[in-house]
Amino acid sequence: MKAVLMYQNGVLKLFEQSNNYSEALSKSENYFKQRKSSLKEASSAFAIRIYFVDVNENSKIFGTITKILPSGKLQEESNGIKWEFRGKYKNLDISVDLIDNKNIVYTIWDVLGTILKQDHRKTIKDLNFTLNVNSNKDSYGEHQKLILFFSRKENCGKLWKYDDIREEMRKSGLAMSGRGIEGERPREFRYMLGYPFLTSEQNKNIPDGFCKCLYPFPIFERNERRSANISLSKEDWSELVSILNKDPKQLRCYECGLFEGETNKIGQKTKFEKGHLLGHLSAGGDTSKGNITSICKYCNSLQKDIYSYDKNTGKKIYHIIPFIKNQKYNEKKLVLSYLLSHMKSGDIDKELKKYKFI
């Protein structure tokens, strides 16, 4: 089986038969053309990843999943990361390699799910496997350590005390740096890679100071950028407004990525408000459904009219004058000094004219 595998912000969008990677690239481009966009335009707003999958199926499954680079060439193993999945499902031998420059291991599981035609939660009882990465042990990344540790079936499905899991990871040669298992990496492990890693923030049945990874494979919806998913169609924005009114727990803050009820960086519980992509005063935004996004109360209070979000890319646009107005006198002097030395004079004039300073 040869196929194209395409992701948008970590969500599988395309899995189709494809004879070669040129055809795979063409099918990906056509996917966006049908949506009145292009692969280039979509890539500026989303994390787009495309793979060419070459799998031989008989009594064995032998496959290679290789990322297609923007140049149209395949990722070379010497310039990337190689993950090796070796397993046995009933009488079926499985050997799948993934070559990419990121730890996007979920592609292996998506391919296996397509071939086995089953939810992994149903196959796990009869599936025995090992997962290895070609990194030297001394240079394992924090994500790699988490993936390797929780890809062992015996480490999943049970409550871990943070101290115990830190010690066990250390014994396994996978010691986390800094706060490690209680820091930012587990959040990325869940949101970016989709692993069902739970703490008391996500599940009230888990006591404070404990954690649990439900399965040794990803099952959650993923977002490679680890922030709120952005959609540009008005139909989706209408659905967003409905969810905001009825069940905000489905949503993630567009700015900080937290879910409803999670604790933010200043210790408050996250609560949602109707946020706006374009600010009212600074960018001429309105209260239409097309300008509404999900944003938590804390982030919404910080935004004010200091910045907006570009509707096409989702990136921040800073509004200079409102920003300066919110600073103290000495900070205003520093900001203005910086702008005068880094901005073109014509751009400064545009800003001043916009707010009728000149």
Image (cartoon, grey):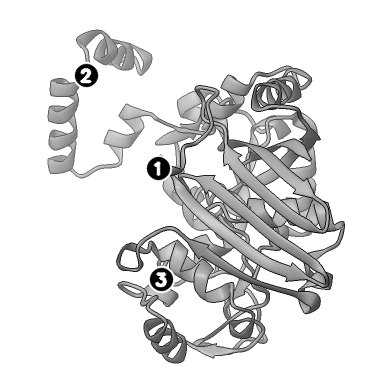
Across and down, in percent, residue 118 comes to 86, 61
Residue 276 visible at all: no
Dividing the image into 4 quarters, which one contains the C terminus?
Answer: top left
User: What amino acid is at disc 1?
Assistant: Ser
The residue at which mark 2 appears reads as 343
> Mark 1 or 2, which is nearer the eye?
1
User: What amino acid is at disc 2?
Assistant: Met
Instruction: Tell me: residue 11, above or below residue 166.
Output: above
Q: Are marks 3 and 1 in contact (CB under 8 Å)?
A: no
Across and down, in percent, residue 65 comes to 62, 44
C-alpha distance separating marks 3 and 2: 38 Å
Q: Is residue 320 left or right of residue 240?
A: left
C-alpha distance separating marks 3 and 1: 31 Å
The residue at which mark 3 appears reads as 183
Name the foreground residue: 261 vs 79.
79
Q: Is residue 79 left or right of residue 325?
A: right
Please tell me how crowded label 1 is: few (under 14), some (14-19), or many (20+) other residues with Cα within 10 Å.
few
Q: What residue is at 45 percent from the left and 27 percent from the top? A: 282
Dividing the image into 4 quarters, which one contains the N terminus?
Answer: top right
Across and down, in percent, residue 40 comes to 57, 20
Q: Which label's residue is closer to the chain start, 3 or 1?
A: 1
Q: Secondary structure at mark 3?
A: loop
The residue at which mark 1 appears reads as 78
